[in-house]
Amino acid sequence: MVDIRKAEGVVIRRRLFSDTSLIATFFTDRFGKVRVIAKGALRRGSPLRGKLDLFMRNSILFYHGRGDLHIVKECDTIGSYGGIRDDLDRIVAASYIAEIVDGLTLPEAPDGSLYALLVQSLAALNASDRPVQVAACFAPRLLSVLGIFPRYSSCAECGERLEGERFYDGASFRCKGCLSRPAAAVSGGTAALIDRILSPGGPGPDALSPPAEQLSELVALSSAIFEAESGRRMKTRLMAWCPAAGRAVDEGRNPVQNACKPG
Amino acid sequence: MEIYPPPLRELINELKRLPGIGPRSAERIAFHLLSGDRSAARRLAGAVVEAVEKIGYCRRCFNFTERDLCSICSDPGRNGRTICVVEQPTDIIAIEKTHGFGGLYHVISGKISPLDGIESGDLKIPQLIERVKREKPAEIILATSSDVEGEATSLFIARELRGHVAKISRIAHGIPVGSSLNFADEITLARAMEGRREF
């Protein structure tokens, strides 16, 4: 008997498989990250056409294919987030979120909290006039739900409580006295910002007004954690794309990220 | 694959790299080329070599051409005041088949994709911006695809060209001719409603 599965999911990556077919990666509520092939999805008249674009939230019916590649049978759009595709900064911000989820999750490892946060972040981006800030603030939450945001209130080596400036060495936060390899300074202001972002019931991203330097440091720190955990380079250069927040500070030259390159 | 002689294995491997050709199709094509009259295979090989050696890019619009300027850029009958921006040379063919556009083109050779790390500098977008500043067209038509990457590309180009050209337009999106509303996705339907025209 064919194992048919039903789930709700967001398209976090897609690529062409042939002229008319594509492979979409969904992050779903029930099965975590799922790759599906949509045969003929790009054909004129295909009921799947237009429903498997990036960031679309769909209800999908799929059955088990070869290995971890499943075959999508039906797809109904629940949320299209049209506001994201109308704005370049929102597209880049949503790409940043999608890359974090795609890069740090294993196939078919369900995580309902992460899915809820992903949907919440896309909904926030869809209407935000500060998409870079929204993405920058959601990134630590995503990393925290994934269980990989390092403890930043005390030194990983000596256990001393960290006040003001602290150092991230690509694995953990340390005090200045315990540094044994190149590490990047993270300001006390950025640490306080992370406190507010991660506190339960804390303010939404749009309610925060961090200075550009803190925002840049936060993005660079999240990217550095992503790169350290996934072992691959973060491709979405959030700050570099967005003129209002980013062109002042090119994250490619940001000391936090540069000091913590993987490998 | 080990059962095949090395040259045949190499041929199959190269065919497999082509878009839309899987391992089975590659084997079938290789066997077809080697069975019976081999003059067809030699003609094919010659055509591939000739195209690779002679076809380059138009220095103005980056369309395929065997000369310095492509046939469209060197046609004095075309309207040089309008430039249509497309992703690939194949898009030019699609638009030319409509006989509805008499302007020039600019091929940007792909689309922006933040998720894949593809940025404007990886495409022919800097050349487009230079060209617009130099030629001062009256209108730029953005004819990139309607997926997220295509929209990102159009939004980026529009942002960069604002102030350098009087009119920047985006091709309309809507319901394909002959198809039913039932099968249209909600973004297409929303765009079709937004872009409706008066009778």
Image (cartoon, coloured by chain):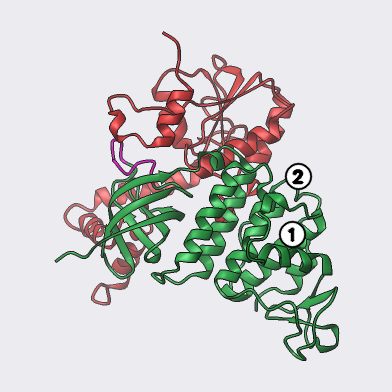
* Label 1 packing within 10 angstroms: few (<14), some (14-19), many (20+): many
The kind of residue on which mark 2 rests is: Ala
Q: Quadrant of the C terminus of chain A?
A: bottom right
**Relative vertical location of residue A199 with respect to residue B142 in this rendering, above or below:** below
Compared across the picture, whether B61 is left or right of A20 comes to right
Compared across the picture, whether B91 is left or right of B19 comes to right
The kind of residue on which mark 1 rests is: Glu
Residue A142: say if magenta: no
Chain to which mark 1 belongs: A
- Residue at the far left: name it: A1
Which chain is drawn using red? B
- Circle 1 sits on which residue? A251
The mark that comes first in sequence, 2 or 1, is 2
Q: Secondary structure at mark 1?
A: helix
The picture's colour for chain A is: green
Could you say which disc has been placed on residue A244 in the image?
Answer: 2
What's the magenta region? A43-51
Label 2 to label 1, Cα distance in Å? 14 Å
- Which residue is at 30% across, 40% downward? A43
- Which residue is at 28% across, 36% downward? A45
Instruction: Say if residue B56 shows up in the picture.
Output: no
Q: Quadrant of the N terminus of chain A?
A: bottom left
Q: Nearer the viewer, residue B172 or B12?
A: B172
Where is residue A63 shown, x and y percent of the image? Answer: 25, 61
Instruction: Say if residue A246 shows up in the picture.
Output: yes
Chain to which mark 2 belongs: A
- Which residue is at 54% across, 41% downward? A85
Where is residue B17 shown, x and y percent of the image? Answer: 38, 58
Q: Secondary structure at mark 2?
A: loop
Compared across the picture, whether B30 is left or right of A22 comes to left
Where is residue B165 shown, x and y percent of the image? Answer: 70, 23
